[in-house]
Image (cartoon, coloured by chain):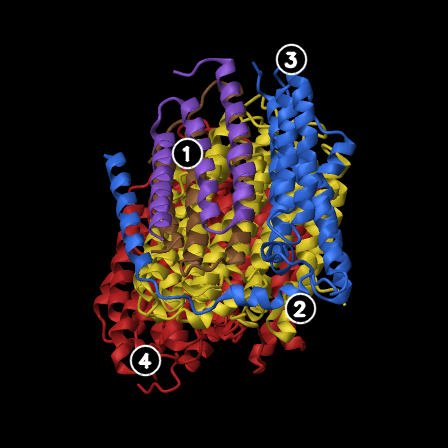
Chain colours: A red, B purple, C brown, D yellow, E blue
Amino acid sequence: MTLNEFLPLAVLASSLLPGLIIFALPENRVGVRTTLNLLAALAKLALVGILLFGVQAGEEFGFAYAVLPGLDLTFKADALGLLFITLSAVLWLFTTFYAIGYLEKAPHRSRFFGFFSLCVTATMGIAMAGNMFTFFVFYELLTLVTFPLVVHRGTAQAMRGGMIYLAYTLVGGALLLGGIVWLHSLLGHTGFTHGGVLATLDSSTHWQLQAIFLLLISGVGVKAALVPLHGWLPQAMVAPAPVSALLHAVAVVKAGAFGIVRIVYGIYGIEFAQSLDLLTPLAVAAAITIVWGSFRALFQDDLKKRLAYSTISQVSYITLGISLFGPIGTIGGLVHLVHQGVMKITLFFCAGNYAETLGMHKVSEMAGVGKRMPWTTVAFSLAAFGMIGIPPLAGFISKWYLGLGALEARMPWVLAVLAASSLLNAAYFLPILYRAWFMPQAAAWPEEHILMQGNRETARLLLWPPLATAALTLALGLFAASSLSPLEWVKLIADREYLTWTP
Amino acid sequence: MTISLAFDLLLAAALLWSAWRALVNQDTFRSVILFIVFGLLLTLAWARLAAPDIALAEAAIGAGLTGALLLDAIGALRGKDRQP
Amino acid sequence: MSSGLIFAITGVVLFAMGSAGMLLVAHLLRRILAFNLMGSGAFLILVGLAQRGGTPDPVPQAMVLTGIVVAVAATALALALLRKLHTLNGRTELPRVEDD
Amino acid sequence: MIDPLIWLILLPLAWATLAFLLGPGRGARTAIAGLSLQLWLAFDLAMKIGAGGPALHAVGGWGAPLGIDLAADGLSAVMLLLAQSVALPLALYARAYFAPDKTETRYFWPLIGFLLAGLNALFLSADLFNLYVTLELVGLAAVGLVAAGGGAAQVAAALRYLFAALLGSSMYLLGVALIYGAYGTVSLVTLEPLLTADAPRIVWMAGGLMLAGLLLKTALFPFHYWLPPAHASAPAPVSALLSALVVKASFYLILRLWLGPFAPLVGALAWLPMLLGAGAIFWGSWQAIRTPHLKMLVAWSTVAQLGYLFLIFPLLATTGALQAGVMQAVAHGLAKAAMFMAAGVLIKATGQDMVAGLAGVAQRLPLTLFSFGLAGVTLMGLPPSAGFLAKWLLIEAALAQGYWFIALVALAGGLLAAGYVFRVLRQAFLLAPVAYAIAAVPRTLEWTAFALATASVLLGLRGVELMALLAAGSAP
Amino acid sequence: MKTAAIVIGAAAFAATMIAALLDLPPSAIHLPRLVDANLPVSGVTHPVTAVLLNFRGYDTMLEIGVLLLALLIVLAVGTHDGADAAPTADPMLQTFARLAASLMALVAVYLLWAGARQPGGAFQAGAVLAAAAVLLHLAGVLPAWREPGALLRSGLAAGFLVFLFVAMALLSQGTLLQYPHAAAGSLILLIEFALTISLGLILAGLFLFLSGGQGSDS
C-alpha cells in the first residue's frame, strides 16, 4: 500500500478509531476522552493539510477494494471532495471544543462523543467516496450514527424528533438505493468521473436515466432538505446544540447537498444533465425551497427552529448554484457549501450559548441580551449579516456568484428568487438583532445557568468557538480573492468540470 | 389370483375402515383400540407385500409398542381429571 | 392389478385421511394417530409402488423399517409433550392461534 | 488425512452421546471443545472446496444408487461454516445463560449435539431418503429444545411446532416415496439426468409435496403460524439456534432440490415462493411492529426475514440471485442469533419481556443494546452489513431481469424492518424511570452476542471470499 | 367451512394421485438387481439386513440417533411429579409374566441370530425385548423408570456408540462405514448385538420413563 493509498484511509481512521476507543471509555475518564477528541481532530486537520497540498500539486489520492465480486468500495480525495473534507475537519475541531464545554456535566458523554466521532467518519467517507456505492454506504452510516445524537436527551420529545428524522432519512435512503442499483445495472459501475459517465449510454436508456435522476435526487434531497422533503429538519432541533450545529453546518444537510453535486457532476456530467433537461426542474425545486424556507422562518419564535428553516433555505443555494448551467453558477453553489457551513455553525453555537447560559430558547425572550452577552451577540450578528448577504461577509460572495451565474445561464428569474430570499433573510434576522441590541431587558432571564464571571459572559469553551467561526465568516469574505481561499479552490474545481465548455 | 386379489381388496377396505373409525371416533380409548387393530391389519398387508421384516416390526413396534404408549397415555390423561 | 399397486393406492387414501386429520382433529391424542396414519400411508406407497411389478424390493423395505422407528420416536415424543401439557394445565388441545 | 466432511457429522454425534453419558446438566465443556473442532473442520472443508471444487464421498464405498453419497459443494460449505460459527458462540452463551442445575439444562448439551449433527448431515447429504432422516433429527431435536423444562405455554408451542414439523416431513417422505416409485432411486446425483421436463405426473406431485412440506418446515408465510410461539417461548439460546439455523436447513434443501434434480420442472412455479415471500415480509414485519413482547418481535422478524430468501426464486437464472439468497441466509443467521442473544440479556436484566419495559437500558447495558442495534442494521439491510450486500445483490438481480416489483418489495421490507428495530432502540434510549433496577448479567452473555452482531456487520465489508466459495462448484 | 375445504382438498388430492399412480411407467433403475449382485460381499445373506446395515447403514446409524434423541427429549421434558405407584398384580400373573418375558428374550436372541439370513434382526429383536419389559412392568414386576443412572445411560447409548465407534474406526481406511470384506459379517453382528440391547432399552425406556414420569398410573 502506497502512501497515496494510505492517506484517505488514515483520514477515516483518525476519527473512527478514537470514536471506538471513546465508546469503551468509562464515563468519568474526562481527561483521556478530551485529549483523545482533540488529538484526533488535530491529527485529521494535519492529514487534510497534506492532502490539500498534494492535490494542489497534482497528486492523486485513492484506494479501492472489493466488497463483492464487481463491487468496490473506492475512496478518492479529489478537489471537490477535499473542499468538503476541509470544511468538515475545520468545523469538527471547533465543534469538539464547543461540545466539550457544552456537555461539561451532562450524562452519557462517552456515548455522545463516540457517535460524534463516527458521524465525522461518515462525513469523511461521503466526501471521499469514489463511486455511488461507497457514497451510499457512508450516507446511510451517517443516518445511523446521527440517530443516537439526535435522541441524546432521551426525552419523549427527543424521541419524536428522532423518529421523524429516521422516517424521512430511511425512506430517502431506500429511494437512493433503488436509484443506485438501477444505475449499477445499466452501467456496471457507479464511479464518479469528471464530466460524468452516462453520456456514452444509448439514447434509448434516457428515460431510465431521467427516472434514476429523480430517485437519486429524492434520496439525497431528504438530507439536503429540499421542499417537500424537509419535514424532519425542524423536528431534529431537539438535539443538543453541538449536534444541531454539526447536523446543519457540516454533516447531514451538507451530505445531501454534496450528494447532489456528485450526482450532477460525477455521474451525469453537467452538460449531459443539461441535455436531458434535468437542471431546470432542479433549479425550480431549489428556488421553491429557498423561498419557502425563508418564509416559514419568519413565523418561528423558537430560535433554533427559525435557524432550522433558515438552513432549509440556505442549503438550497448550493443546489441552485449547481443547477445553473455554467461555471460561474457552479462556483457560487460550491463556495456556498463552505460559506453556509461556517455561518450556520456560528449561529447554532450562539443559539446554544443563549440556551445554555440563560435558558433562552425563544426569539421573544431575547430582548436586551446584547448587553448581557455582547460577544456572543456580536458573533451572531456577523453570521446573520453574512446570511443576508451584506458585503464584505462570506454570504455576499456566494450570492454574487450565484447572481452572475443566473445571468450567464440566462435564467433571470433566479435573480428575483435571490432578491426575495435576501429580503426574507433580513426580515427574519434583523428583528432578532434589533431585539438583542436595542430593546431593554424586559424580564428576568428564563433560567440563568452560568453567571457573569468578571467580564466573561459565559464559559470559555462556549465562547471561543463562535467567535472563531464568526471571524472566519468575515475573513472568507474579505480575503476571497486570496489564493488560499475556498473561492479559488472552487474555481479550480469548476475549471475541471467544464472541460468541454465554451461560453 | 382372483382370491388373492379379493383378499387384498378386502384387507385394503378393512385398513381404510379401521383408520377412518380411529380418526373420527369421539372416544379416545376406542380410537386407540381401533388404531391397534389397524396396526395388526397393516402387519397382514406387509406380509402380502412380501415384506416379513416390516410385518414383524409393524406388529412389535407399530401396533404393539405404539399401542402400549397410547394406552398408557390415555390412562395418564384420564387419571388426572376427566376431559370434557 | 398387483398387491403392490393396491396397497399403494390404499396408502394414498390413508395419507390423505391422515393429513386431513392432522389439520382438523383438535384432540392431540387423535392428532398423533392421524400422524401415524400419514406415516403408514407413505410407507405403503413407498413399498407398494416400488413393488408394483410384483418383485420384492429390499431397499424400500429397509427404508420403511427405518421410517417405522422414526415414527415411533416421534410418537413417543409427542405423547411425552402431551402428557406434560396435561399435567401443567389439564388440557389435551392446543389453544387457538391468536392471528390467522 | 482427516476428511472434514465426515468428521463434521461424526464429531457432534460423538460429543452429544458423551454428554449424555456424563449425566444430566453435564457436558458443556465437551460440547464447546467439540464445537471448536467443528469450526476448524468447517474452515478446513471450505478451504478444500475453494481450492479443489466439490467433494463427493460414497458412504460404505458403494456409491449411488445402491449406497448413500455425501456431497459438499460451495453452497454446503457456506451453510456448514454458518452453522458452526453461530453454534460456538451460542454454546458459550448458553453455558453462562443457564443456571447450572435448572431442569431445562439437564439434557441441553446432548440435544444441541444431535441438532448440530443433524444440520451438518443435512447440508452434506445427497440422498433424498437420508435427507428425510436428517430432517427428522433436526426437527425432533429442535422441538425438544423448545420444550425442555418449560411451562405450559412453552410445551404448547413445542407441540404446535412438532405437529407442523411432522406434517412437513411426512409430506416430504411421501414425495421421496413417489420419486423412488418413479425412478427407482433416491440419489440426487443419479436422479439429475433422469428427471426431465416430460416427467410423469406423479413426479410433479412428488415435487409439489416435497416443496410444500419443506415450506411448512421453513415457516414461509402462510405456513408460519407455528414459528412465533415456538421461537418466542423457548429459552434465548434455543431461540437463537432455531431462528438462525434450523429454519435455514429446510430452505437449503428447497434450494438444493430446486437447483438440482427438480430444475427442469420448476420454471413456471418460481413466482409462488416469491409471492409468499413478499407476503411473509409484509405480514411478519407488520406483526413485529405490533407485538408488545420483545422476543415475539424478534420471532416475527424471522418470519419476515425468511421472506427475502424466497424472493430469489424467479431470478435464479442469474448467479447474483443465488448469491443474494445465500448472503441473506448467512446475514440473517448471524444477526438473528445475535439479536435473540441480546434480547435474552435484556430480558434477564430487566426481568420482563415487554418492549415497553426497556426504557433506559441504553444507559445500563450499552454493549447489549449496541449488539441489538448492529444486528438490526443487518436485518434492515443498511450498510455496511451483510444484510445490505444481500439486498444489493437481490435488487440488482431483480432489476437486471426487469422484475422491478421484487426490488420494490426488498426496499419496502427494509423500511418495515426499521419500523420494528427502532421500536426497540427508541424505547431503550428513553430516560430510565426513577428507582429502576437492573439485574447484573454475566459478561459472556454480552460479549458473545456482540461478537455475532459484529460478524454480521463486518461480513458486509468483505463478501468476496464467501461468494468465491459459493461459486466453487454449484453442482455436486 | 374450513373442514369442508380440507376434506374436499384431501379427496381431490387422493383422486389425482391415484390417477397419476395408475399410469406410471416402470422405473428406470432397478435396485433389487444391484442388491442381489452385491449381496455376496455384504457380509450377510438376507437382503433387507444387507441394505439396513451395509448398503444404507449410514441411514440406520442416524436413525438410531433419532431414537436416542427421542428418549433424551422424553427425559428432558421433565418427569418430576406423580407418585411412583408401582402396580401390584396377583402372583399368578407375575409368574406368568416372568415366564413369558424369558421366552421373549429367547425369541429376541433367535431373531437377532436369524437376521443375517432371513427376516428378523436388531429392530425386531429389540422390539421384542422392549415388549417383554413392558409386560413385566404391567404385571408389576418391573417398576417404572425415573432418572436413568450411569449404567442405564450406558446401556441406552451402547448401540449407538458401538455403531459410531465402528464408523470411526473404519475411517482409518478412508471411507465411512466401509467394512473390510472378511470382517463384514462379524462387524455387522457386533453392531446388531449392541443395537438389540440399546433398542430394547430405548423402546422400553420410552414406555417406562413416560409411565414413571407424569402418569399417575391407576
Q: Is residue D111 above or below residue A10?
A: above
Pick the front one: E9 or D366: E9
In the image, are marks 1 and 4 on the same chain? no
Please name the residue that numbered disc 4 is placed on: A271
Which amino acid does the dot numbered 3 rest on? Thr
Which amino acid does the dot numbered 4 rest on? Glu
Quadrant of the image containing the N terminus of chain E = top left
Left or right? Give the position of D376 relative to A392.
right
* Label 1 – label 2 distance at C-alpha: 43 Å
Which amino acid does the dot numbered 2 rest on? Met
Q: What is the number of callouts on the image?
A: 4
In the image, are marks 4 and 2 on the same chain? no
Pick the front one: E209 or E33: E33
Q: Is residue A413 above or below residue E97?
A: below
Left or right? Give the position of A79 relative to B13.
right
Please name the residue that numbered disc 1 is placed on: D291
Residue D100's image quarter? top right
Q: Which mark is residue E88?
A: 3
Foreground tag (1 vs 2)? 2
* Label 2 – label 3 distance at C-alpha: 63 Å
